[in-house]
Amino acid sequence: MSIPVYMDNNATTPCDQRVVEAMLPYFTKHFGNAASHTHSYGWVAKGAVDFAREQIAGFIRSEPGEIIFTSGSTEAINLAIKGIFELYHQKGNHIITCGTEHKAVLDTCKALEKRGAQITYLPVNKDGSISLADLENAITPHTILVALMYANNETGYIHPVKEISKIVHERNSYFFCDATQAIGKIPVNVNEDGIDLMSFSGHKIYGPKGVGALYLRRKNPRMRVQSQMDGGGHENGFRSGTLNVPGIVGMGMAVQLCSNEMSQDSERISRLRNQLEQAMLKTGKVSVNGNVTSRLPNVANLAFHEVNGSQLITEVTKSIAVSTGSACTSALPEPSHVLRAMGLPDDLAKASLRFSLGKFTVQEEVEFASKTIEDILKSL
Ligand code: PLP
């Protein structure tokens, strides 16, 4: 066990050794540019990209031609939301999202507000859920996109994606889903879930950093987005730029491993998460933030009562790598926008920690974390 114990897998995950091994030849021996059509170096690279595209498309039940490789989820989110805003402006300028989305979505929407978009930020309930009636009422004939995440990165709350897509489509709009935290943890099927565009990322699933993808539905309905990167017309013109071949190969392998191992990993991880959470609840000073019935298997977002938040965080992070979910500067500690949107008072939001376990988390680490925090709570 190495200290600090790593419990911040929603921030990023270590690369699986099998992913690293799959990637290595594409840095050296097979270094070709996937867009070089005239020689075998290029063909080998393109073959590897095509294979990864098939692995990834198969995992989310899409077609290979519906996958656009990007540098990560943030880029995929920008491409989806800005790309729809720019191409569908004749239909309208209205986009719906909610207050607990990732900053990549919220800040993209804010940027579009300056360009004339009208954004509705749906409120959330205490448990992080939205009211489906609110969603239904918010959609107008000018609503070009509903952007709601699959699962929340801070609380793990899973939105009722099928119900959301049904409402969105009945009202003739389109559904973009940020599935960065859901992919690899719970099954995602773009057809059954009714998703029109979806973002996800390699480094959250034991793959490399700097690679991600946008799923763009090509049939029923055929979606289009305005490219945000001009250049050589790669990725069917949707995202110019030389493809990150080793990264894409690594993401393909990471997805393949999820496909083979996700269900047994998730079961084990959720047992460990529950064990940690139960130990914390037993102290009598802890409550769970967010809905616990519709939640990712690896996350526990816990509020620590009657303690000073910054003292708690300083002590805990000496030996456990967890996140506060907040953007902090020492002068101005800002409570998490997600917990705030859920109505948590600022002092409790500041004394909340997100534990996100992963497939490399072991029992010993959970026991260590529980004991360490119990001791800290006694000492504070
Ligand atoms: N969306 C969610 C829900 C996330 O958790 C993250 C990463 O923290 C992102 C988007 C951004 O992903 P990336 O790091 O691949 O840009």
Image (tube, helix red, strand yellow):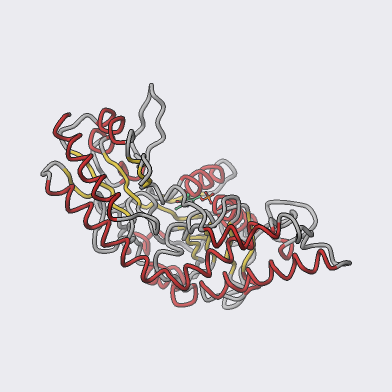
Q: Residue 334's image quarter?
A: top left
* Quarter of the picture holding the C terminus: top left
Q: How many marks?
A: 0
**Residue 145 in the figure: left or right of residue 348:** right
Residue occupying the far top of the picture: 331
Q: Residue at x 40, y 56 (%)?
A: 360
Q: Is residue 347 above or below residue 143?
A: above
Q: Nearer the viewer, residue 376 or 192?
A: 376
Q: Residue at x 57, y 78 (%)?
A: 220
Q: Residue 350's image quarter?
A: top left
**Residue 239 in the figure: left or right of residue 299:** right
Q: Residue at x 34, y 60 (%)?
A: 296
Q: Position of residue 149 (x, y in %)?
A: 43, 58
Residue occupying the far front of the picture: 1
Q: Nearer the viewer, residue 85 or 190?
A: 190
Q: Residue at x 35, y 65 (%)?
A: 266
**Residue 140 in the figure: left or right of residue 352:** right
Q: Nearer the viewer, residue 223 or 183?
A: 183
Q: Position of residue 369 (x, y in %)?
A: 26, 45
Q: Position of residue 107 (x, y in %)?
A: 51, 43
